[in-house]
Image (cartoon, grey):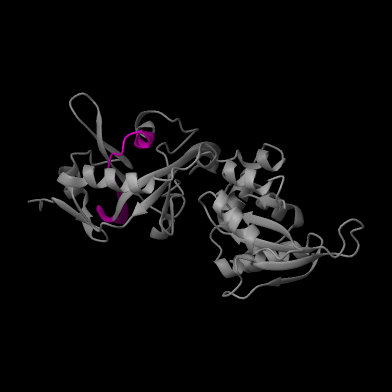
Amino acid sequence: MAINPVAVFRVGELYTNDQIRFALEVENLGGIRPSVDARRNLRHIAIMTAAEESGRVMAENPYHDRIEGDILLYTAQGREGDQQLAGRNKRLVEQYSNPLPFYGFMNTGHQTYRFLGLLELLRHYRETQADRRGILRQVWLFEFRIHAQPDVVPVDHAGAISATLLSESRRNPLSELEREVADGVQEADQVANISLEAEILRSRLIQILPYRFEHLIKALMESSGFRDVTVTSASGDGGIDLNAYVEDNNDFFAGTHVQTQVKRWRHAVGSVEINNFRGALSASAKGIFITTSHYTRAAIVEARHSQKPSITLINGDRLSMIVQRTGLKIETFM
């Protein structure tokens, strides 16, 4: 069967596995497909993702890939056991120092892939996940920015295009603290052990629709010593998702006004989000930021800034533990 040769990839268009393989000179299997020269120097990488939006069940896709806006959350290779930052996984971090083109493709089934655009590696970090056997393990997560523009990428010019994109994007490079992600519950002064039940619960929390998720947090706060908890309107909230007050039976903080922002995200929350949230707070309110994901170290530093109002951070691991402790039934919000 003749293969229609591809010299240009267009964002949003579909390509067969063979078209990608021959155009980019990569292997026809695997999620990370590097192309190297005769000296084993990396030329480019094709990254194939089966994000949760594709509808694959966990048994078929234990990688938990996810696209949020223009961010691709990509789990490294290795279906069982702890993943290592070695081999093809290690190839991904080469883009920090060398602006090589990374091609992003979404698996649509039947050996067909949709071109997402060129990818830019923002950060990578370890996370606890459950593998397809239901066993907890340590995996490597990579956060990529999807560049949907230019929407036409000639293979022969992809290197120059990628170099320009990354140069423009990195004029204000991420600080080291912004690249680093906090080590889960340990940063929240919680126990280091994450149970399988808690991790499965966290993965289910991410599936809840945003508006229902806000109401889940409302119920959680009502079960945790707050009164008059209200969800703000979808528009015009200025970054505030919930308002609440500490119950009167709290001798130290009775009546304290608390404002909360929630992010049903998989990718990490950075210092920009924390700073923006602080700017939206009422002058007398205390702030709580809740996410189903993690915080960068820069976000934690910003939240604890000694000369600014402190903000309480609750990450996904801690959130799932709170849900377990209160006995809240999340099925009501699914």
Work out whether residue 190 or residue 54 is closer to the camera in this orientation and state it. Answer: 190
Residue 132 place in picture, x, y as percent: 48, 44
Residue in the image at 32% along x and 35% along y: 98
For the record, the magenta segment spans: 92-115
Residue occupying image coordinates x 35% and y 37%? 95
Q: In this view, does 130 lie to the left or right of 289?
A: left
Residue 96 in magenta stretch: yes
Magenta stretch: residue 78 in it? no
Res 170 visible? yes
Q: Position of residue 176 (x, y in %)?
A: 51, 37
**Image spot of residue 329 (x, y percent):** 68, 62
Residue 141 in view, yes or no: no
Q: Which residue lies furthest to the top in this view?
A: 39
Q: Which residue is drawn at 23% across and 60% down?
A: 13
User: How many marks overall?
Assistant: 0
Considering every residue shown, the one lying at the far front of the view is 307
**Looking at the image, residue 218 lies above or below residue 63:** below
Q: Which residue is painted at 40% across and 28% down in the image?
A: 86
Residue 105 locus on image (x, y percent):
30, 51
**Residue 242 versus residue 113: which sits nearer the camera?**
242
Corner quadrant of residue 35 = top left
- Looking at the rendered image, the quarter that the C terminus falls into is bottom right
Q: Is residue 94 left or right of residue 209?
A: left
Nearer to us in this view, 146 or 175: 175
List the single residue furthest toward the left: 2
Q: Nearer the viewer, residue 303 or 319?
A: 303
State whether residue 237 is above or below residue 46: below
